[in-house]
Image (cartoon, helix red, strand yellow):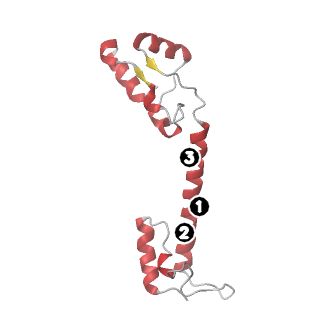
Amino acid sequence: VPASWLRSSLALLREAEVGPVPNGEIRCEHGKADPAKLGEMRLVSPAAWRRMVERFGGGPELDTAGCAVCVRAALRTRRTADRTAQLKEALGQALSSPPSEEEEAFLVPKAFRAKWAKWRNEGVADATGELRCTHGGWLV
């Protein structure tokens, strides 16, 4: 049940002012409970659900399992974001500390290092564009 509807219905308790239960607001594109909207939902017992629908109307009834498709998509997005953050962190560390004698090292323009820090703060996804030639290879 949408939390906002539940709060207002408990405050009003008159059918004319409350209106039907608008569960459509908390459904995903697959017609199930949208995991991205968990903070906007409240779990009610089956008995409470039946009473609300009998008194106010509305729906549809949403399964507590939610949408597995949306959960998987959210996890993929999260993993990608986590991996991007790890790569940015690694690049930042690599650019701010000199390599050890055992590590292979490459030179980048000082201007790039300063720009990279600015881009990182602005959330730019690929800060290596200026290090590539028009053919996609690395500048030498």
Left or right of residue 118: residue 43: right
Which type of secondary structure does the marked residue at label 3 adopt?
helix
Q: Nearer the viewer, mark 2 or mark 1?
A: 1
| 66 up-or-down from 59: above or below | below
Q: Amino acid at mark 3?
A: Ala
The reply to whether callout 3 and callout 2 are in contact (CB within 8 Å) is no
Q: Which mark is residue 63?
A: none
Q: Which mark is residue 89?
A: 2
Q: Crowding near pointer 2: few (<14 within 10 Å), some, many (20+)?
A: few
Which type of secondary structure does the marked residue at label 2 adopt?
helix
Residue at the location (56% across, 46% down)?
Answer: 74
The reply to whether callout 2 and callout 1 are in contact (CB within 8 Å) is no
Which type of secondary structure does the marked residue at label 1 adopt?
helix
Residue at the location (40% across, 14% down)?
Answer: 56
Q: Nearer the viewer, mark 3 or mark 2?
A: 3
- Which of the image's four quarters has the C terminus? bottom right
Q: Amino acid at mark 1?
A: Arg
Q: Position of residue 112 (x, y in %)?
A: 45, 81
- Which label's residue is closer to the chain start, 2 or 1? 1
Gap between marks 2 and 1 measured at Cα? 10 Å
Q: Which mark is residue 74?
A: 3
Question: Outermost residue, right direction?
Answer: 102
- Which label's residue is closer to the chain start, 1 or 3? 3
Q: Crowding near pointer 3: few (<14 within 10 Å), some, many (20+)?
A: some
State the image quarter where residue 15 is shown: top left
Residue at the location (57% across, 64% down)?
Answer: 86
| 113 up-or-down from 14: above or below | below
Does residue 56 appear anywhere in the picture? yes
Q: Which mark is residue 83?
A: 1
Q: Amino acid at mark 2?
A: Glu
How many marks can you see? Answer: 3
